[in-house]
Image (cartoon, grey):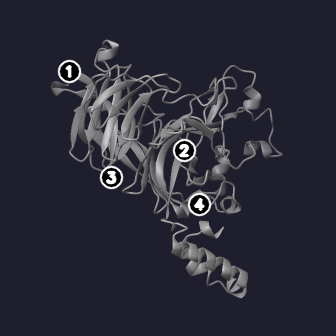
Amino acid sequence: DLQKIPRSVLENEIEGNPLVKKDKRCQVHILNIKMKYITGLIKEDDGVREAILVAGGCSQVMFASIFSILPFRESLAVKSLLGYILAEDRWIELAPLPHQMQQAIMTFCSKKNCLYIFDQGNQSFSSRVFIYKFDLEETKWTSFLLELPENHISGSLHTIVACSGKLFAVISCHIIQKGGQNVQWSTFLMEVKEDGTKSEIKNHLFQRNENTSVVACVMQDRKICILATKVGAIPRRKGKSTKFFVYDAALNRKYEYSRGVNWDNLMFAAGDEIVVTRMGKFSCMKYSMTTRKWRHVKEQFLPFPTQPFESTDFSSISDGSNFYVFGGKGVKSMESVAEAMCYNYAEKKWKKLQELPQPLRQGATCCIQLPSNLAKCHIKCPHCIFFPSRSRAKYDVHYQREEDDDEYDYDDGSGYTFDDDYVSDGLWSDGVPDYLDDDEYDDYENWFI
């Protein structure tokens, strides 16, 4: 289909091909497409594809056939980075993550055209943690340290968001007061620096306790919205322990609009409003950026896709007009699923999308403007099988050793082999571990080695 080929490629490469010049039918076909471009019947490719990325998470159950009779199942964390092209209803694959991430958090900065991700599976760190960056232009993975300011220890990174071309993080940590006798457990908004300097605290948000929960989202690429519940050093009554903040990145100012807000586990932008609800609930809270007030709406803003909805641990995201759900875990089977669905706010209807390339749950999601050169190939196309995406990307990353918070390992991708790619993640494999394919393998003596 020549309509899906960029006009520059059509005119500079295909039209001048010797084989095309010899065939009049090919010349007529190209001329018809060029006339459609001239008359405006076909929109020129701007080189960008609207997409949603799904990264990390857990895939198939490890050794499911062996442990199927047991009440627990072990899952296999993956390092795949998948992209769903919205306009074409298809999946692509990008260069995999530097390492497996079971509970990844991800955001995209459109001004820098870079993706940022970290593994929330490591809940706490002493004073520094690695964040990974993927440059879409260079197709290169790098890493940098997020370092807490002096006298801030035992950090816990809740989420990261990109806003106005900058990277921000919502972090909780213990702040050592003067004299070292008093320690205050607080949550604050921090601007993350990539140049190796210590990150800058923008605003102190609230004191917290072990039951505090926090969610955040970005509105209009200018305002960061933060919702928290059970705040305070000592939990108070439900209504008084929920806080809502809006940080204006352009003005560097924080505003609190907690009056009338209630907590729920989903907060996202829909149109020019912030919606707080949960799937299947027959009411929701809406915050207007114009009136700067909360209002309670008695409507089922986000119904279940099916009745009953038998999936948990699914990944979800809103693009302002639609709510997307990817993967999850079956309530009865306890196995990861590959289902993908979309709910349109205006039409109030669910529709099924192309399934994930592999069963997946707890994956990180973000909306992204993807360069068209990264969106050419389909899943399992012959080109990607013999030239996998990892071999076409660069890796210049450090990562923290599990046993020592101050020791780091380095990976520049030089030791890469084909076996390190998606085969190990199950995307290309037949589900059988490599060592079980070895004729010399002893099923009994070496099983627990």
Q: Which quadrant is home to the N terminus?
A: bottom right
Report helix, strand or loop for mark 4. helix
The residue that disc 3 covers is 165
Q: Earlier in the sequence, mark 3 or mark 2?
A: 2
Question: Which mark is on residue 181?
Answer: 1
Where in the figure is residue 241, as x and y percent of width and height? Answer: 31, 18
Q: Is residue 364 left or right of residue 226?
A: right
Q: Amino acid at mark 3?
A: Gly
Determine crowd level at label 2: few under 14, some 14-19, many 20+ residues with C-alpha closer than 10 A. many
Q: Earlier in the sequence, mark 4 or mark 1?
A: 1
Q: Amino acid at mark 2?
A: Val
Gap between marks 4 and 1, in whole Å? 52 Å
Residue at the location (72% across, 47% down)?
429
Question: Which mark is on residue 89?
Answer: none
Closest to the camera, between mark 4 and mark 1, is: 4
Q: Is residue 420 left or right of residue 297?
A: right
Where in the figure is residue 320, as x and y percent of width and height? Answer: 44, 42
Could you tell me how many numbered marks the image carries?
4
Report helix, strand or loop for mark 1. loop
Residue at the location (75% across, 42% down)?
432
The residue that disc 2 covers is 54
Where in the figure is residue 307, as x and y percent of width and height? Answer: 64, 24
Hey, which quadrant is residue 57 in on the image?
A: top right
Q: Amino acid at mark 4?
A: Ser
Closest to the camera, between mark 2 and mark 4, is: 2
Q: Earlier in the sequence, mark 3 or mark 4?
A: 3
Hey, which quadrant is residue 180 in on the image?
A: top left
Name the foreground residue: 386 vs 10: 10
Q: Amino acid at mark 1?
A: Gln
Is residue 149 in sight in this rendering? no
Question: Which mark is on residue 391?
Answer: 4
Report helix, strand or loop for mark 3. loop
